[in-house]
Image (cartoon, rainbow, N blue to C red):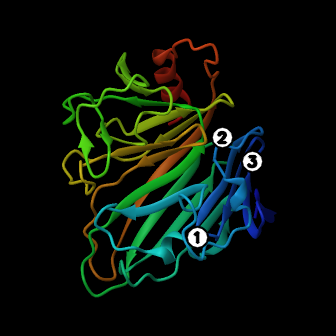
């Protein structure tokens, strides 16, 4: 198929490479991940070098790195190692297109299908996860993205009116606490955006923005934009009703997590959620200067639609 081939990558044989003139995406059946998403060189996805070729028979530190996806709600869904750590089928489905198919998972009663499609000309990568109910009872799970970007970048989230959170975000911890009035010098609100400028005091953050996109500016001068649907009239299953979660670990990685609403899936039914990704060139402010947020908005509106 055009723009599609089989390669060995990061110690994994039989990966699927999707590529056009300037963009690459590499997909593996190992834990159903995207290992590379790059524009003209640098990989926007963080991979732990110690995990090269690893078979995830048990959960290593932080789980598998890479372009990960999952289902939730995080705190109430049964453990599902076959979905999270298992081997998936990986098949080429068309030009610059691949599909990942999980095992049938008894604890959750579902099977997951992930369709990844790279645009012919741009960096646009469509990532669709379908939750298929293989049980004989209704299931109430939702999409949960858990994709690692490279460390040390800046998260930019456009704010929307009427947030439930006084400061437009919550911070998890210490322990089971969710802090709705955190104070952190690395997080600020400016010109209609929430900016996470560096590693926060606690790793896990949650937001309820309904803008339907956010961006991550990494130190390789790549602005990773994620667009996804949001629904004001549907329940979200995370504890604080989040539409986004961000998780920083030191300066190594940053987890970029669009969250979907709760899906009520009947036996034999399915529900899908699509994230649309772009990599746009934009200079990281190594001198500590402020990002031009109006320019970012215009860039995303023009180039990431």
Relative placement, left or right, of 37 versus 186 is right
Q: Is residue 14 above or below residue 274?
A: below
Query: What is the distance, in whole Å, between disc 1 and disc 2 at their CAs?
Result: 22 Å
In 3D space, how far apart are the residues under numbered discs 2 and 3 (Cα atoms)? 8 Å
Question: Foreground: 225 or 289?
Answer: 289
Residue 227 sits in which quadrant? top left
Above-or-below relation of 172 to 14: above
Q: Residue at x 40, y 70 (%)?
A: 131
**Other-residue count near label 1 (Cα within 10 Å), few / some / many at <14 / 14–19 / ≥20:** many
The CA span between labels 1 and 3 is: 20 Å
| Residue visible at 67% across and 66% down in the picture | 28
Judged from the image, the secondary structure of the residue bearing numbered disc 2 is loop
- Judged left or right of residue 16, residue 253 is left
Q: Is residue 292 above or below residue 278?
A: above
Give the image location of residue 73, x and y in percent. 31, 61
Do residues under tags 2 and 3 come within 8 Å of each other at their CB atoms?
Answer: yes
Q: Nearer the viewer, mark 1 or mark 2?
A: 1
Residue under label 1, please give it: 100
Tell me the mark number nearer the camera, choosing from 1 and 3.
1
Label 3, residues with CA under 10 Å away: few <14, some 14-19, many ≥20: some
Q: Residue at x 50, y 37 (%)?
A: 305
Q: Which residue is mark 2?
A: 122
| Residue indicated by mark 3 | 20
Could you say whether the residue bearing mark 3 is in a helix, strand or loop? loop
């Amino acid at each position: 198929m055009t723009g599609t081939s089989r390669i060995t990558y990061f110690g994994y044989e039989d990966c699927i490479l999707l590529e056009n003139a300037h963009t690459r995406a590499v997909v593996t059946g190992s834990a159903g991940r995207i290992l590379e998403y790059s524009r003209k060189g640098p990989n926007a996805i963080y991979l732990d070098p110690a995990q090269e070729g690893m078979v995830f028979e048990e959960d290593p530190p932080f789980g598998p790195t890479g372009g990960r996806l999952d289902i939730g709600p995080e705190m109430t869904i049964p453990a599902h190692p076959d979905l999270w750590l298992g081997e998936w089928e990986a098949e080429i489905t068309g030009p610059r297109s691949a599909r990942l198919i999980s095992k049938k998972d008894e604890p959750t009663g579902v099977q997951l299908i992930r369709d990844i499609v790279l645009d012919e000309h741009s960096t646009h990568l469509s990532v669709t996860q379908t939750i298929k109910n293989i049980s004989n009872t209704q299931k109430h799970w939702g999409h949960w993205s858990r994709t690692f970007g490279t460390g040390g970048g800046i998260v930019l989230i456009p704010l929307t009116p009427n947030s439930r959170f006084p400061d437009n975000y919550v911070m998890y911890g210490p322990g089971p606490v969710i802090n709705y009035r955190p104070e952190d010098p690395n997080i600020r609100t400016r010109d209609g955006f929430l900016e996470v400028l560096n590693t926060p005091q606690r790793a896990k953050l949650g937001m309820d923005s309904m803008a339907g996109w956010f961006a991550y500016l990494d130190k390789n001068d790549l602005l990773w934009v994620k667009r996804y649907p949001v629904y004001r009239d549907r329940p979200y299953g995370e504890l604080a009703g989040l539409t986004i979660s961000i998780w920083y670990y030191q300066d190594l990685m940053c987890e970029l997590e669009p969250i979907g609403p709760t899906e009520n899936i009947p036996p034999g039914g399915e529900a899908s959620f699509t994230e649309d990704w772009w990599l746009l060139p934009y200079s990281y402010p190594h001198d500590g200067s402020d990002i031009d947020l109006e320019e970012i908005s215009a860039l995303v509106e023009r180039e990431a639609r």
